[in-house]
Image: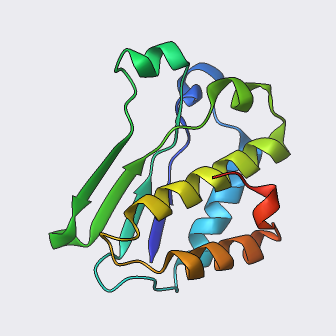
Amino acid sequence: MELNINSPAYYKNVYGVDDAVYWMCRRISKYFEDKKYSDLVDIIGICPIVAPKELIESGKWKENITYDLEFRLVIVGKTIDYEQYVKSGDGEKSKLMVGNILKSIKCISRKAKLDYNLFERDLLEFLNYSEKDISI
């Protein structure tokens, strides 16, 4: 499976890219290259949204899901709490990002016929996290 994880929308424009989160996401993408969780989808793009609540409420940064099953592709944009992310250190930001990845995968799992439980287990084991470490 090809898992493309973008740097958080809005946040990266204001604060730049957090190296620790960026490299963790690269490692995650590499880890999932030889894995398969769905017979319908081969490519998943995850576009986390880290923006102030007022911008999200005004419609500037909306959560979204785009399915293009002809190309076996899904793109997901889900929010991460802006205040919490901005105030967090690298370790906590990484956990928030993992929570966003899991939330994104979970919300497409039914339509994409994706084995969410196996994906979650593999991701948490790879990062040596437990379910208690992550909030979805």
12 lies above or below 21: above
> Residue 93: where, in percent of width, then height?
74, 42
| Left or right for 51, reference 42 | right
> Residue 78: where, in percent of width, then height?
47, 43
* Residue drawn at point x = 83 percent, y = 71 percent: 128
> Residue 107: where, in percent of width, then height?
43, 59
Residue 117: quarter of image = bottom right
* Number of marks: 0
98 lies above or below 42: above
* Residue drawn at point x = 62 percent, y = 61 percent: 26
* Nearer-the-camera pick, 131 or 36: 131
Residue 113: quarter of image = bottom left
Residue 17: quarter of image = top right
55 lies above or below 6: above
* Residue drawn at point x = 51 percent, y = 48 percent: 6
* Nearer-the-camera pick, 119 or 29: 119
The N terminus is located in which quarter? Answer: bottom left
| Left or right for 35, reference 42 | right
* Residue drawn at point x = 56 percent, y = 19 percent: 52
